[in-house]
Image (cartoon, helix red, strand yellow):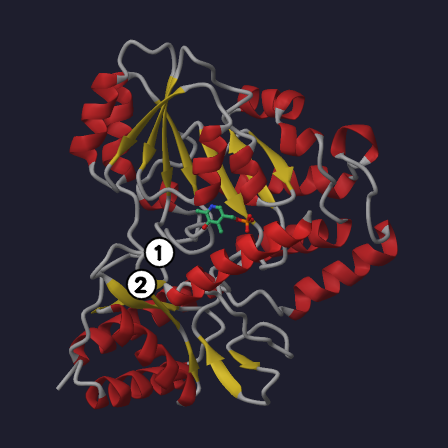
Amino acid sequence: MYSDFKSYLQKEISDIREAGLYKSERIIVSPQGAEIELNTGQKVLNFCANNYLGLSNNPQLIEAAKKALDSHGYGMSSVRFICGTTNLHKELEAKIAEFFGTEDTILYAACFDANGGVFEPLLNEQDAIISDSLNHASIIDGVRLCKAQRFRYENANVEDLEKQLIAAKDCRFKLIVTDGVFSMDGNVAPLDKIYQLAEKYNAMIMVDESHSAGVVGETGRGVTEHFNLKGKIEIITGTLGKAFGGAIGGFTTGKKEIIEMLRQRSRPYLFSNSIPPMVVAAGIKMLEMMSATNELQDKLHFNTKYFMEKMSNIGFDIKPTQSAICAVMLYEAKLAQDFAAKLLEEGIYVIGFSYPVVPKGLARIRVQLSAAHEIHHLDKAIYAFTKVGKEMGVIN
Ligand SMILES: *Cc1c(COP(=O)(O)O)cnc(C)c1O
């Protein structure tokens, strides 16, 4: 039975390789951080983690996780509603709601699950989901699981959004869905304008703050803070796997009736294990740290501004943004791949992205800034970009 399937898979995999789309993985032997060590012995500066606040290897979070291992054990061996809820889970949910200025929060094993489980329990064929064309894969999958009618608008294009809202005007409930920050350009969703349209057409809004929580907004409360809309958005989803410590876990936070319904009906919540107490405890610590001081957000904002200004002064084509994602545009796929490979030789770890991850002819290197970076790290990266850029004729 397997031999036919095996040759089928071998053929498919070799097609992936030939198309230049095969993904291989670098192996890290150190903790995640500004400086990491690979299994080749090479030490490199990491500019491709979602470690925006530098918390992935934070001593206070590690300490909190260790304490919870002692006080609450290793795992829960249960979903939340059977016997998987500890006082820590409830405390983290309350703290996340406090952070975003929302009413209640529900935890998931990942934001992929939060997005996978948010639509189907809330909406049906009478309703409309109006989704940005560049929304994350987990939103797309979540929408597929739901019977609501689907409308799609061009990325961050409010004129097109309005057209879709008009097309959906006879639906019972309308939900506009957008990423807060889009991961490839690092652009921030125009939530102020989206909110105005939502008011005009009586629609609700869901924002996925995965790349924006901890990052965007003066105090890192995300795009809802950036646009002064704290507490006004019906649904926010996010991850503990990026700025918020980088381990694992996701959440949906928002209006309390919505969260209550998700606890009753959301399948990834009902049928998947609780996140372990140590991760939950570190999450609580993380939010306490962020309420106590704005140091990390300030440092991230400083680093981002510093890097983007220098790079654009040198002559690189940088997409402007308020996020910590800096897209260095190179346009040609091969140039982006070669450029990233040369940077690695210089000790700078970044990834080149090309079609189909980004549109054809818009290849780029994505640089992700972090509060873990010191000025000398940024300077080293800028130096390497300049050197390779000159060698490859990208800048003069
Ligand atoms: C990373 C990401 C997710 C997935 O988060 P996990 O917690 O890793 O599953 C979902 N949505 C967006 C916008 C993301 O960037």
Helix or strand or loop: what does disc 1 sit on? loop
Q: Is residue 214 left or right of residue 186?
A: right
Residue at the far left: name it: 396
Question: Above or below — where is 362 with respect to 82?
Answer: below
Relative image position of residue 342 (x, y in whole percent): 35, 85
Ligand 1 closer than 8 Å to label 2 CB: no
Who's the residue at 67% across and 70% down the image?
59
Relative image position of residue 169 (x, y in whole percent): 26, 13
Q: Image quadrant for the C terminus?
A: bottom left
| Nearer to me, 382 or 227 | 382
Give the residue type at disc 1: Val
Relative image position of residue 282 (x, y in whole percent): 68, 56
Determine contact: label 1, label 2, CB under 8 Å: yes
Q: Is residue 262 left or right of residue 122?
A: right
When asked about the image quadrant of residue 114, the answer is top right
Give the residue type at disc 2: Ser
On the question of residue 329 being in view, the answer is no
Question: Above or below — where is 364 with respect to 134?
Answer: below
Crowding around mark 1 (Cα neighbors within 10 Å: few <14, some 14 to 19, many 20+) is: few
On the question of residue 76 being in view, the answer is yes
Q: Is residue 371 left or right of residue 73?
A: left
Who's the residue at 59% across and 34% down the image?
105
**Which residue was labeled with disc 1?**
357
Mark sitting on residue 354: 2
Crowding around mark 2 (Cα neighbors within 10 Å: few <14, some 14 to 19, many 20+) is: many
Relative image position of residue 222 (x, y in whole percent): 41, 47
Task: Measure the C-alpha gap from mark 1 to mark 2.
Answer: 6 Å
Number of dots carrying numbers:
2
